[in-house]
Image (tube, helix red, strand yellow):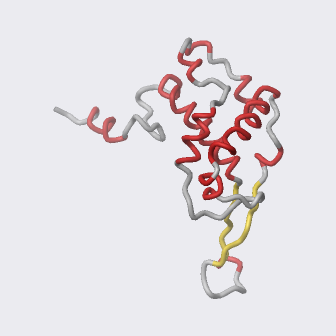
Amino acid sequence: MLYFLRKLNFCFLGTKWKIFDLLITKEEILWVIQHLLTGKLPGLDGFTAEFYKAYPEELAQFLLVMYNEGLAKGRLAPSLSEALISLLKSSKDTLDCKDYRPITLISCDSKILSKILANGLDRVITSLIQADQVGFIRSRSFSHRFWLFQPF
């Protein structure tokens, strides 16, 4: 992912690209920790969102160093790309393969970094995507486009 981001040419964005800086702040980490969903299963490391919410300051400092060092070196910690895929039974019949569905358990470290990068991209995406494209952009709605094509 870092290789891809560094190879992109965003010079046409000018100063807007500076908003999506690859230097992560402690405030960003604390905000994401505060908004983590609780009651979810942990990833391979065994730490839940409740653990991160219990010790936000201590963990934010650790994550800040890990994320920014990884971004600076262009190589993130291997644990950030690991996940556990498990099968969940979706009905009582356990002999049929179609009665199982996979679930991927990702560590909170990965979820936090993903949310920080998504928030950074969200700040500049309107400059990257044309105004008539409204899908999956928070500040745009299909209903706005629908009314544009209505006859008067």
Q: Residue 147 placed where, x, y %?
A: 26, 36
| 46 or 113: nearer the viewer | 46
Q: Observer-nearest residue: 77 or 128? A: 77
Residue in the image at 72% along x and 86% along y = 95
Q: Residue furthest left?
A: 152
Q: Is residue 50 above or below residue 77?
A: below
Q: Specify the quadrant that holds the N terminus.
A: top right
**Quadrant housing residue 46:** bottom right
Looking at the picture, how far across and down is residue 111, in whole percent? Answer: 65, 48
Q: Position of residue 92 (x, y in %)?
A: 62, 87
Query: On the rendered structure, is 61 left or right of 34?
Result: right
* Residue 11, above or below 23: above
* Left or right placement of residue 28 versus residue 7 in this view: left
Please determine whether, in this image, residue 125 is positioned above or below residue 141: above
Query: In the figure, is residue 118 to the left or right of 69?
Result: left
Q: Quadrant of the C terminus?
A: top left
Total label count?
0
* Residue in the picture at 66% in, 59% down: 48
Q: Residue at x 55, y 15 (%)?
A: 13
Q: Position of residue 148 (x, y in %)?
A: 28, 32
- Image point (64%, 42%), residue name: 57
